Amino acid sequence: MSERASVEQLKSGVIEGDRAALSRAITLAESRRGDDQEAAQQLIAELLPRTGGARRVGITGVPGAGKSTAIEALGLWLIEQGLKVAVLVVDPSSSRSGGSILGDKTRMQGLSAHEDAYIRPSPTSGMLGGIARKTREAMLLCEAAGYDVVIVESVGVGQSEAELAELVDCLCLLLVPGAGDELQGIKRGIMELADLIVVNKADGDRVDAARQARGDYHQALRMLPPSTEGWETPVLMASATEGTGLPEIWEAIEAHRRLLEESGQLTERRLRQRQRWLKSMIEEAVLASFHDREGVPEAIADAERKVAEEQLTVPQATAEVVRAAGLDPPERA
């Protein structure tokens, strides 16, 4: 079977909504082999006209916020409304195998079993932050397969929020009540990025604490610039286990989407995301090419030895490695 035939078969399968074909297409995109990458980019290029229509939602939150439970509850509720839902779970890589731990997929058993849902855990494979190397391609393939909502879950609070915000249209920050000194544990930068804040686990004897937390977050947002021009970030309460607050969450996501579309910010935001994606891919390609240059691995090993023995400072050792690659070290102020 020729490569062209294989791409055509995957293309047909993805368009038909075949989940097995979609999984094979994402696996192809995640492959680091040159021939696989060429085939994957050919496939995505041909499917590109079918992408862009889905609601792209990022969900992140503090540890213990119940992200997986909330995603499953929201996903099942959206399916009841007649929508198809894809979930891309960015898992921490196994330190030995580099593969996905798959924990979130096993926790979302009800959603993963539904014919109108698709869950794909992807390993971060050593990437910094919380976004897997090929999450963008996976998202485009899910859109081409006809999924109306693509939810991307990051691994946790930190650098991942900035990366996730550059991938989705609406970023939802999931928090919990009664954790004590709530605002002290949330970085200002994360609050600024959130288009929607949800206080989860607002049930039982935690309802009063959830109301207090909602008020505190709402007050804190008054001192921060808006995540989106013309948008006031809502702070909602929900209970994923009891299924409450889900319609309000979706209503807020849709209201944010309407604002983006009517103001022209959706087009601008996605263009900016593609430009930053291009820049990151160029940097990744240049770095890979640098490490593949003849003599560079040996120069790095020699530099590490000299730094360890305090023969050179780190900047001096860096300059030696760059010169070994046949390049001029950048001038530093």
Image (cartoon, grey):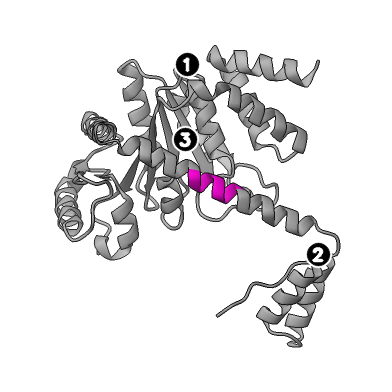
- Give the alpha-carbon distance from disc 3 to disc 2, as whole Å: 44 Å
Q: Number of labelled discs?
A: 3
Q: Is residue 321 left or right of residue 181?
A: right
| Mark 3 or mark 2, earlier in chain | 3
Query: Tag 1: residue type?
Result: Glu
Asked if residue 186 can be seen in this view, the reply is no
Q: Position of residue 284 (x, y in %)?
A: 64, 52
Is residue 280 located in the magenta-colored stretch of the structure? yes
Task: Please report the bounds of the magenta region as a residue range.
Answer: 275-281
**Which residue position is annotated with label 1?**
115
Could you tell me which residue is drawn at 69 percent across and 73 percent down? Answer: 329
The mark found on residue 296 in the picture is 2
Query: Tag 3: residue type?
Result: Arg
**Which residue position is annotated with label 3?**
107
Q: Is the residue 223 above or below the residue 39 in the image?
A: below
Between disc 2 and disc 1, the foreground one is 2
Circle 3/circle 2 CB separation < 8 Å: no
